Image (cartoon, rainbow, N blue to C red):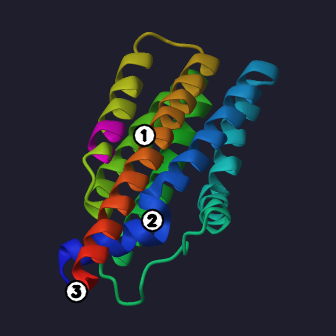
């Protein structure tokens, strides 16, 4: 399987990752709600707990819109996706322990961590959109931390950026799928 074929398989299986971005955006919106209505500690835990559900919710959305929610067995990019998940999990304790000392730094740290993970998705899906999303999330983290932005503002920025990019990714996927279907139709004729 070539890199292009592997990326195409990932895009077909996971709707170019748009469903995952949407699920992540929902998790950030939940955290913003907790930041508005509860304590800083509960806001931190809300993102950590909601984050556990990003992948399953993304898969559910895939199934609801007709995507497989899986890649082909043997796709080498599946291992890269798994490795990036472990990297994310390994970073969570750092963000949490940072929040124990300075709660306001938790969401900027998470923006950096998640932004870094999205850079890997640029290779998984072969889409420049993930470079832009990852770098914007990281830039937001870098800007919000020294400004001592409130937890609400930081969580809302993460939610809004991911919501915008989820829409953009859905649009890109539909265009890509139409182009691929047209190409396949012309080959079959």
- Quarter holding residue 81: bottom left
Q: Which residue is mark 3?
A: 1
Is 110 contained in the magenta span?
no
- Compared to residue 45, the image places residue 74 above or below, namely below
Question: Mark 3 or mark 1, which is nearer the start of the sequence?
Answer: 3
- Circle 1 packing at 10 Å, graded few (<14), some (14-19), many (20+), is few
User: SS for tag 1?
Assistant: helix
Which circle marks residue 86 in the picture?
2
Question: Mark 1 or mark 2, which is nearer the start of the sequence?
Answer: 2
As rendered, which of 150 and 28 lies closer to the eye?
28
Choose mark 2 or mark 3, whichever is in front.
Answer: 3
Choose mark 2 or mark 1, whichever is in front.
Answer: 1
As rendered, which of 27 and 142 lies closer to the eye?
27
Residue 106 appears in the rendering? no
- Compared to residue 140, the image places residue 29 above or below, namely below
What is the magenta range?
130-134
Residue furthest to the right: 37
Q: Which residue is mark 1?
A: 168
């Amino acid at each position: 399987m070539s890199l292009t074929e592997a990326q195409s398989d990932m895009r077909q299986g996971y709707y170019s990752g748009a469903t995952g971005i949407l699920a992540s955006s929902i998790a950030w919106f939940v955290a913003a709600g907790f930041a508005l209505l509860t304590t800083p500690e509960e806001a931190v835990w809300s993102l950590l707990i909601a984050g556990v559900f990003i992948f399953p919710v993304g898969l559910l959305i895939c199934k609801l819109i007709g995507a497989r929610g899986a890649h082909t067995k043997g796709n080498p990019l599946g291992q890269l996706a798994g490795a990036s998940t472990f990297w994310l999990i390994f970073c969570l304790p750092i963000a949490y322990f940072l929040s124990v000392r300075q709660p306001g730094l938790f969401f900027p740290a998470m923006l950096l961590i998640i932004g870094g993970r999205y850079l890997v998705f640029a290779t998984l899906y072969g889409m420049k959109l993930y470079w832009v999303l990852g770098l914007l999330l990281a830039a937001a983290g870098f800007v919000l931390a020294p400004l001592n932005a409130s937890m609400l503002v930081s969580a809302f920025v993460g939610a809004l950026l991911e919501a915008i990019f989820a829409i953009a990714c859905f649009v890109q996927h539909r265009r890509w799928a139409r182009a691929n279907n047209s190409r396949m139709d012309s080959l079959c004729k």
